[in-house]
Image (cartoon, rainbow, N blue to C red):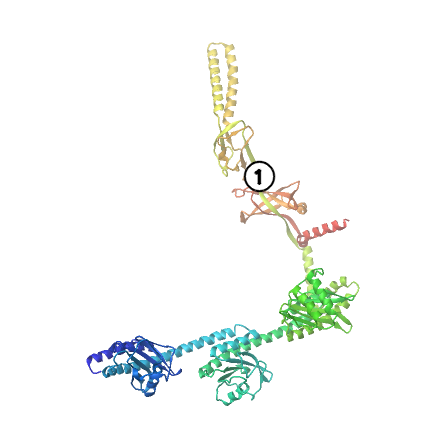
C-alpha cells in the first residue's frame, strides 16, 4: 500500500483497532474494513482456541452464518490454511460440500479465500472471504493482507489482555469460591452434616467425578464419606501407609496430582470394575501438624484432567476442611465431656438422697441432657404388679389417664420378658421378628406417635425392682454410645432404688427424714462457720426483741372537705342571674345568685308609700294639735316602718351570698339561670378549702393502735413528690366493708393554706403509732393471722 490513500486507510484502520481492547470488537473492525474493499462479499474472522483445538468465529459481515460454538481445527479450507499458513484461494467448482460444511450459504458463490492471521510465525486466526461474483484481485488481496498483518498485532495484544483479565477474574472467582466454601464448612459443627457438605462442595468446585473423604481411624485411614460413585473404593474401606495413593499421602503429608499414565493411578484402576480414572488429586487434611484425614478427588472423564490450578485449589480447600473437621471434633469431645459430667451429675443426684420420688424424677429427667429421647418412664414392681411411678416432664402423675394406662400395660408386658427390648418402626416395617410383638407395638406406635421404644430391666441379686424405658418419634434416636450410657444409668438407678426402698421401711421415716436431713446438712458445715451462723442467728433474734422501730399503720386515703355549705332557696322564685362558676373561690358575703325580685320590690314600694302617707298624716295632725289623730297615725306609721324593714330584708335575700370561705363545687351552676325553684331547693354547694380532712381506711386489726392526735403523713396521687402532714382528729366509731376487708376511718386534719388539696383526691396514708420492737413490727401481721387460724381450728 504505497499510495497516500492506502496509507490513510491503514492509519484510520490502526487507530480504530487501538480504540478497542478486546478481540471481538477488533475482529469486527477488521471484517468491516475488508468488507469496504470487497463489497458484496461475506467476510468472516476466526481466532484459534488452542485449548479446544477449534476455530472460534469472532466477527462476520455478509449473508453467511456459522456455528459460533466452534469449528474443528482441521475442518475444510480452515484446516488447509492452518497447515499451509499462507493465502489460499479455492474456486467453487473445485470444492465439495464437505470443504465448506461449516458455512451456511443460501446462494451460490464463486470462490473462497483464506488469509492467515500470523504474529511472528504464530497462527492466531484466519480471515475467510466468500465471494459471490468475481474473486478478489491481487491488489485488493495485498491491501487485505496489510490490514490483516496490522490486525494480527492488535489481536495478539487483545488476547494477552483477555488472558490477563480472565486470569484475574478466575483468581477472584476462586478466592470467592474458597471464601464461600470456608463459610459453608464453618456453618455447622455437626460431624454427620459436615462430611457430605465437604465432599459435595469439592466435587462442584473442581468438577470431579468422585470425591472420597478418608479419616484417621486408629492406625488406618477409613473412607467415611463419598460424593459420586467410585467402583475402586467404597465407604468403609481402609488403607494403611504403603497400600495405595491415599496411604502414601497420609504418611508423607504431601499433595499429589496423577494423570492416566502414572503407575500409581494405573494400579488403582486395577481395582475398578468399570471405567478407569483419567486423573486424580489427593491432599492431606492437617491441623496443627496432626493428620486428620485425606481428601481424594478423582476424574473418570477421559476428556477432563486436573491441572496444577485445580491442585492448588484443592490444597486451599483441604486447609479449610481440616479446620472445620477439627472444630467438629472439638464439639464431639465437649459432648463426651458433657456425657461424663451428666452421668456424674445423675449419679450424685440419685445417690445423694434416699427420697424415692426424688430418685425416680432424677432417673427419668436428668439423662435428657445427653440422650435425645422424648419420653422416659420408670415402673416399679410392687406386690407382683408393675406400676408406672414416674414419667419425664410430669411432676404429678395421673395413673388413670389413657397415656399412662397404655404405657403401664406395655411396661407390664415387657417386664415379664425379663430382658432388654428394642423395637423401631421405619415407615410400615417394625423391627421385631415375632408377629405378636410387631402387632402389639404397631398399635402402641399408632396411639402414641412414637417410632422407637427401648426398655431395660432394673434388678440385682435380691430380685427385680422394675423397668426403665425410653421413647422417641425418631426410630434411630439411639446410638451405640447411648446404649452404653443407658446401661451405666440402669446400674446406678438399681442401686439407688434399692437403697431408697430399704430406707423407706424405717419406722416414722416420713417425719424424721426432713429433720435428719437438715441436721445432717448443718453438722456438715465447718465448725467455725457453724459457730458464726449460730452467733448471727442470736444477734438477729436479740435485734428483733430489743431494737425499737417506728411503727406505721398504712391505709388508702381520700380527701374530704372540713366544712361544706349547701345554699338553699328561701322561697319560691326564679333564678335571674348567677355571679359565680364551678371552681371559683369565694369569701363570706360574696354574692352567688340573684333571684327575681320584682314582687318584693313592688311590695316594698307599696309599704314605703303607705309609710310615707302615715308619716305625713301624723305630721298634719300634730300641726292641727289633734293628739288623738296624731297618735293613731303614729301607731300606723310604726307598724308600716316595721313592714318596710321586713320587706327590705326580704328584698336583700333575693341576692344569695356565701356564708363561708371556700370553693364553688356545684357543676354547671350557670345553668340555673331561668330555673324556677321551690323553697328549700339546693342552689349551690360551697366547700371549705382552708382545712381538709383526709379519711385513711385502716384495717380492723390495726384500729387498736390508733390514738387521737397521732401524726400522719399523706401521699396523694395528684402530688406524687409531695408529702402532706396532719394529725388524727377522730377515729370513726363504726366500720365499713371495703371489698373483702372491714375498715375503720381515721380522720386526719391537714392544713390546706394554698388550696392545693381538693375533695376526692386519693392516695396513701401512714399514721405513726409510736415505737415498737423490730420483731413486733415485722411479724405482727403474720402472728395475728396464725393465731386466728389456730383459734378457728381448735377454738380454745
Neighbour tally class for label 1: few under 14, some 14-19, many 20 plus, Cα within 10 Å? some
View extreme (bottom): residue: 263
Q: Which residue is mark 1?
A: 562
View extreme (front): residue: 93
The x and y percentages for residue 654 are 50, 28
Quarter assignment of residue 750: top right
Res. 153 visible in picture: no
Quarter assignment of residue 225: bottom right
- Which residue occupies the foreground of this view, 184 or 56? 56
- Which residue occupies the foreground of this view, 322 or 169? 169
Which residue is found at the position 50% from the left and 80% from the top? 209
- 42 lies left or right of 270: left
Which element carries disc 1, helix, strand or loop?
Answer: loop
Judge whether 347 appears above or below 687 on screen. below
Quarter assignment of residue 378: bottom right
The x and y percentages for residue 165 are 37, 78
The x and y percentages for residue 669 are 50, 35
Q: The N terminus is located in which quarter?
A: bottom left
View extreme (left): residue: 4
Judge whether 270 appears above or below 25 on screen. below
Judge whether 128 appears above or below 522 on screen. below
The x and y percentages for residue 32 are 28, 76
Res. 411 visible in picture: yes
- Which residue occupies the foreground of this view, 95 or 516? 95
Judge whether 93 appears above or below 533 on screen. below
- Which residue occupies the foreground of this view, 139 or 249? 139
- Count of numbered marks: 1
Amino acid at each position: 500500500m504505497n499510495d497516500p490513500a492506502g496509507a490513510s486507510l491503514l492509519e484510520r484502520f490502526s487507530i480504530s483497532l487501538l480504540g478497542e481492547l478486546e478481540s471481538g470488537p477488533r475482529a469486527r473492525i477488521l471484517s468491516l474494513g475488508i468488507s469496504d474493499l470487497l463489497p458484496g462479499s461475506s467476510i468472516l474472522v476466526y481466532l484459534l482456541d488452542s485449548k479446544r483445538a477449534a476455530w472460534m468465529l469472532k466477527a462476520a459481515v455478509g449473508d453467511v452464518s456459522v456455528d459460533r460454538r466452534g469449528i474443528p481445527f482441521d475442518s475444510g479450507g480452515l484446516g488447509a490454511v492452518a497447515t499451509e499458513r499462507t493465502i489460499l484461494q479455492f474456486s467453487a467448482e473445485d470444492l465439495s460440500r464437505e470443504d465448506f460444511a461449516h458455512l451456511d450459504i443460501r446462494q451460490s458463490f464463486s470462490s473462497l479465500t483464506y488469509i492467515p492471521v500470523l504474529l511472528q510465525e504464530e497462527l492466531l486466526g484466519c480471515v475467510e472471504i466468500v465471494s459471490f461474483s468475481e474473486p478478489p484481485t491481487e491488489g485488493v488481496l495485498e491491501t487485505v493482507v496489510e490490514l490483516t498483518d496490522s490486525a494480527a498485532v492488535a489481536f495478539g495484544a487483545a488476547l494477552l489482555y483477555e488472558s490477563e483479565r480472565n486470569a484475574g477474574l478466575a483468581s477472584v472467582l476462586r478466592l470467592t469460591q474458597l471464601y464461600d466454601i470456608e463459610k459453608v464448612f464453618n456453618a455447622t459443627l455437626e460431624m454427620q452434616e459436615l462430611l457430605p457438605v465437604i465432599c459435595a462442595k469439592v466435587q462442584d468446585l473442581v468438577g470431579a467425578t468422585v470425591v472420597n473423604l478418608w479419616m484417621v481411624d486408629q492406625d488406618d485411614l477409613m473412607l467415611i464419606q463419598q460424593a459420586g460413585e467410585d467402583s475402586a473404593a467404597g465407604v468403609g474401606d481402609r488403607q494403611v501407609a504403603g497400600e495405595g495413593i491415599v496411604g502414601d499421602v497420609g504418611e508423607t503429608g504431601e499433595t499429589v496430582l496423577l494423570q492416566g499414565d502414572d503407575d500409581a493411578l494405573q494400579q488403582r484402576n486395577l481395582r475398578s470394575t468399570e471405567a478407569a480414572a483419567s486423573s486424580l488429586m489427593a491432599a492431606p487434611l492437617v491441623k496443627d501438624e496432626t493428620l486428620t484425614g485425606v481428601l481424594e478427588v478423582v476424574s473418570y472423564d477421559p476428556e477432563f484432567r486436573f491441572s496444577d490450578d485445580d491442585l492448588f485449589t484443592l490444597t486451599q480447600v483441604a486447609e479449610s476442611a481440616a479446620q472445620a473437621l477439627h472444630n467438629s471434633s472439638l464439639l464431639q469431645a465437649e459432648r463426651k465431656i458433657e456425657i461424663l459430667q451428666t452421668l456424674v451429675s445423675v449419679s450424685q443426684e440419685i445417690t445423694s438422697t434416699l427420697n424415692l420420688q426424688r430418685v425416680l424424677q432424677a432417673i427419668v429427667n436428668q439423662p435428657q441432657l445427653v440422650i435425645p429421647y422424648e419420653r422416659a418412664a420408670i415402673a416399679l414392681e410392687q406386690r407382683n404388679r408393675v406400676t408406672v411411678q414416674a414419667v419425664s416432664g410430669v411432676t404429678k402423675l395421673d395413673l388413670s389417664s389413657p397415656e399412662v394406662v397404655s404405657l403401664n400395660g406395655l411396661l407390664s408386658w415387657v417386664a415379664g420378658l425379663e430382658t432388654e427390648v428394642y423395637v423401631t418402626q421405619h415407615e410400615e416395617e417394625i423391627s421385631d421378628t415375632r408377629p405378636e410383638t410387631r402387632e402389639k407395638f404397631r398399635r402402641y406406635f399408632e396411639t402414641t406417635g412414637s417410632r422407637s421404644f427401648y426398655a431395660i430391666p432394673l434388678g440385682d441379686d435380691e430380685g427385680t425392682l422394675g423397668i426403665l424405658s425410653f421413647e422417641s418419634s425418631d426410630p434411630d434416636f439411639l446410638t451405640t454410645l447411648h446404649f452404653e450410657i443407658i446401661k451405666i444409668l440402669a446400674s446406678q438407678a438399681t442401686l439407688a432404688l434399692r437403697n431408697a426402698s430399704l430406707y423407706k421401711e424405717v419406722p416414722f421415716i416420713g417425719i424424721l427424714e426432713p429433720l435428719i436431713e437438715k441436721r445432717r446438712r448443718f453438722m456438715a458445715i465447718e465448725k467455725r462457720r457453724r459457730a458464726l451462723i449460730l452467733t448471727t442467728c442470736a444477734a438477729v433474734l436479740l435485734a428483733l426483741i430489743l431494737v425499737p422501730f417506728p411503727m406505721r399503720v398504712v391505709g388508702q386515703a381520700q380527701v374530704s372537705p372540713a366544712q361544706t355549705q349547701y345554699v338553699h332557696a328561701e322561697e319560691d322564685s326564679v333564678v335571674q342571674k348567677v355571679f359565680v362558676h364551678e371552681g371559683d373561690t369565694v369569701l363570706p358575703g360574696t354574692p352567688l345568685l340573684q333571684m327575681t325580685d320584682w314582687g318584693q320590690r313592688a311590695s316594698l314600694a307599696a309599704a314605703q308609700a303607705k309609710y310615707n302617707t302615715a308619716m305625713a298624716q301624723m305630721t298634719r295632725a300634730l300641726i292641727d294639735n289633734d293628739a288623738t289623730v296624731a297618735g293613731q297615725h303614729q301607731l300606723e306609721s310604726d307598724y308600716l316602718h316595721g313592714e318596710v324593714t321586713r320587706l327590705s330584708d326580704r328584698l336583700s335575700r333575693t341576692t344569695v351570698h356565701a356564708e363561708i370561705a371556700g370553693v364553688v363545687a356545684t357543676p354547671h351552676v350557670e345553668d340555673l339561670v331561668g330555673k324556677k325553684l321551690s323553697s328549700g331547693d339546693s342552689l349551690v354547694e360551697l366547700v371549705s378549702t382552708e382545712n381538709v380532712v383526709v379519711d385513711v381506711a385502716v384495717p380492723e386489726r390495726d384500729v387498736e393502735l390508733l390514738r387521737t392526735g397521732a401524726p400522719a403523713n399523706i401521699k396523694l396521687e395528684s402530688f406524687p413528690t409531695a408529702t402532706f402532714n396532719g394529725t388524727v382528729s377522730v377515729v370513726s366509731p363504726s366500720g365499713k366493708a371495703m371489698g373483702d376487708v372491714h375498715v375503720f376511718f381515721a380522720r386526719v386534719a391537714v392544713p390546706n393554706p394554698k388550696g392545693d388539696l381538693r375533695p376526692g383526691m386519693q392516695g396513701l396514708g401512714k399514721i405513726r403509732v409510736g415505737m415498737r420492737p423490730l420483731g413486733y413490727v415485722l411479724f405482727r401481721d403474720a402472728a395475728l393471722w396464725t393465731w386466728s387460724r389456730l383459734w378457728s381450728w381448735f377454738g380454745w
